[in-house]
Image: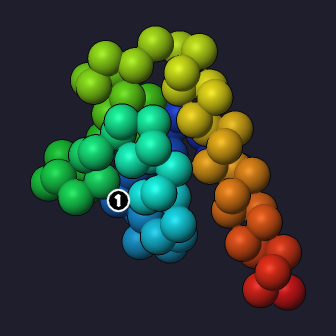
Amino acid sequence: MTITKDTNIAELVNLYPKAIEVFTAFGLHCVGCFASAFDTIGEGAQIHGMIDEEIKEMLEEVNVVLNNEKSQDD
């Protein structure tokens, strides 16, 4: 699964709790917010004032972390 700005926040963190660490490191603290059930990563990031380059960097990092986690599970 590739994580994009269109990925739903709540669905992602339910499947991959490690994503919370990445989001928190980038200042995206809405993972526990009720709105995360409806918001995508891109929407949540923009609401929290992140610019496109920050969103791109965060998405790259979360994909690396989750791919590493999946590799360790195999």
In the rendered image, the residue lying farthest to the bottom is 74
Residue 52 locus on image (x, y percent): 53, 14
Residue 72 locus on image (x, y percent): 81, 81
Indicate how the structure is coloured in the image.
rainbow
Q: Secondary structure at mark 1?
A: helix
**What residue sits right under mark 1 in the picture?**
10
Q: Is residue 15 left or right of residue 40?
A: right
Looking at the image, which residue is at 14% across and 54% down? Answer: 34
Q: Is residue 74 left or right of residue 22?
A: right
In the rendered image of this protein, does residue 65 appear above or below residue 6? below
In the rendered image of this protein, does residue 24 appear above or below residue 32? above
In which quadrant of the rendered image does the C terminus lie? bottom right
In the rendered image of this protein, does residue 73 appear above or below residue 6? below
> Relative to the observer, which residue lies in front, 5 or 22?
22
Query: Is residue 32 in view?
Result: yes
Q: Is residue 55 left or right of residue 24?
A: right
Amino acid on which disc 1 is placed:
Ala
